[in-house]
Every structure is written in C-alpha cells, then in structure tokens.
Image: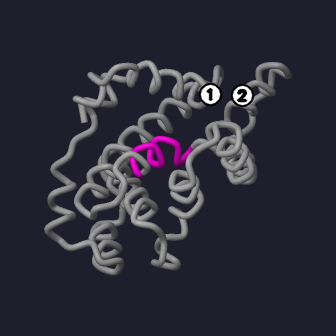
Amino acid sequence: MQGLLAKPGCRDALGEIRARLFHAPGRDAEAQAWWHEGVATAAFAARVAQLKQASIGASFLGGLLHRSGEALALKMLARVELDYRMRLDSASRREWCTTHSQDLTERLIRTWSLRADIESCLLEWMRCAEFGAVSGESAALYFGRLFAIELLQPQFCVPGALDHAAAELGLGADLVAEVRKEDPRGLIRALD
C-alpha cells in the first residue's frame, strides 16, 4: 500500500480528501480517529478485494469514504459548537452524526459525482451482514472495516467475531489469515 503514495498526485488527492472531510476544528481527535479508521479500512478492503477479484479501486475509495457522512456531520457540528461556544456531550454528538450521516453521504456522492460502483459500495456495506447479496466491493469494505477495528480498536472487538462473520459470509480462514498480515499503520503515519 505504501507504493500507492508514489503514484503522481495520489498523496495530494488523499490530503485533499482529509482536509475536506476529516478536519473539524474543536473535534480534531474524533476527526483524526475517523481518518485513521478510513485509511485502515481502505487498505484492508483493497486487500480483500484483491483476493476476492473485486474492484480494488472502488473498495479502497469506499473504505476511505465509508465514514464520510458522519465526518461531514461532525464538521458541521464542530462549526456550530465553535460559533455558539458550546459543546455537545458524546451521546448527543453520536446521535447527531448518525442521524445525518446517510443524507450527507448521498449528497457527497452526488456532489463529487462518484462512480456507481463506489456509490453502491458506500450505501451497501453496512447491510452486508443482513443480506449477504451485496457487491464484492461492498463486502470487501465491510470486512475491511472489521479488520480495521480489530487492529485500531481491539477493545471493541468480540473475540472471534470477525472470524465468525467471515465464515458466515464465505470468506475462508486462509483469506482472513492473509488479510491479517496487512498492517496499514505505516500508511496512516505517512498520511498524517
């Protein structure tokens, strides 16, 4: 994944995405955590996509943007908090971001004219466990996020949950072991 940054314009494009979506003065820690999760999810999703013959590019970009609606909601909230010199508690912040994330994700898709495969990836990945009949890219994103959470926030992972979900949705133990070898923390550091 580090080779990705050597491609002309890639580092600048990723920096632009971070600046537009994952920069929220007053809520910097949350925005940075979501950026880190997005980068890790993108790296893991791209690896799953590669192993499952899905679109690597759509899976990577979907992973990077999977929290974009929440990030935009956080950015809006942070601006209001600064303007009014107030701060919502964590539960209210979560509710605000969750309530507005779907609409903001859809607006982002339209405003940025994202391709149909990236659009479906962003809108379907959360339903992967419910329906199972989603695109390969959406499934790659779903698992990419599970791997990212396992790596970055292991305290939130139920032991064996990722392996169980993978088995249930047809991701073999050998593929899971292969993806677990990835460590996107170097990419995260390079993009900070």
| Residue 58 seen | yes
Of callouts 1 and 2, the N-terminal one: 1
**Outermost residue to the right:** 84
Residue hosting label 2? 78
Residue 115 pos. (x, y %): 56, 48
Amino acid of disc 2: Ala
Q: How was the colour assigned to the protein in this rendering?
A: one colour
Residue 144 pos. (x, y %): 36, 54
Q: Nearer the viewer, residue 127 or 148?
A: 127
- Which residue is drawn at the image coordinates 30% and 78% (left, top)? 170
- Which residue is drawn at the image coordinates 48% and 71% (left, top)? 134
Q: Is residue 147 above or below residue 35?
A: below
Q: Is residue 174 above or below residue 79?
A: below
Amino acid of disc 1: Arg
Residue 60 in magenta?
yes
Q: Find the magenta span and give its range.
A: 59-67
At mark 2, the secondary structure is helix
Q: Nearer the viewer, residue 4 or 95?
A: 4
- Which residue is drawn at the image coordinates 51% and 57% (left, top)? 121
Q: Nearer the viewer, residue 37 or 12?
A: 12
Give yes or no for contact between labels 1 and 2 (Cβ–Cβ under 8 Å): yes
Q: CA distance from mark 1 to mark 2?
A: 6 Å
Residue hosting label 1? 27
Horizontally, residue 61 falls left or right of residue 83, namely left
Q: Is residue 72 above or below residue 133?
A: above
Q: Residues within 10 Å of mark 1 (few under 14, many from 20)?
A: some
Q: Quadrant of the C terminus?
A: top left
- Which residue is drawn at the image coordinates 56% and 45% (left, top)? 67
| Residue 192 seen | no
Q: Quadrant of residue 30 in the image?
A: top right
Q: Is residue 173 above or below residue 91?
A: below
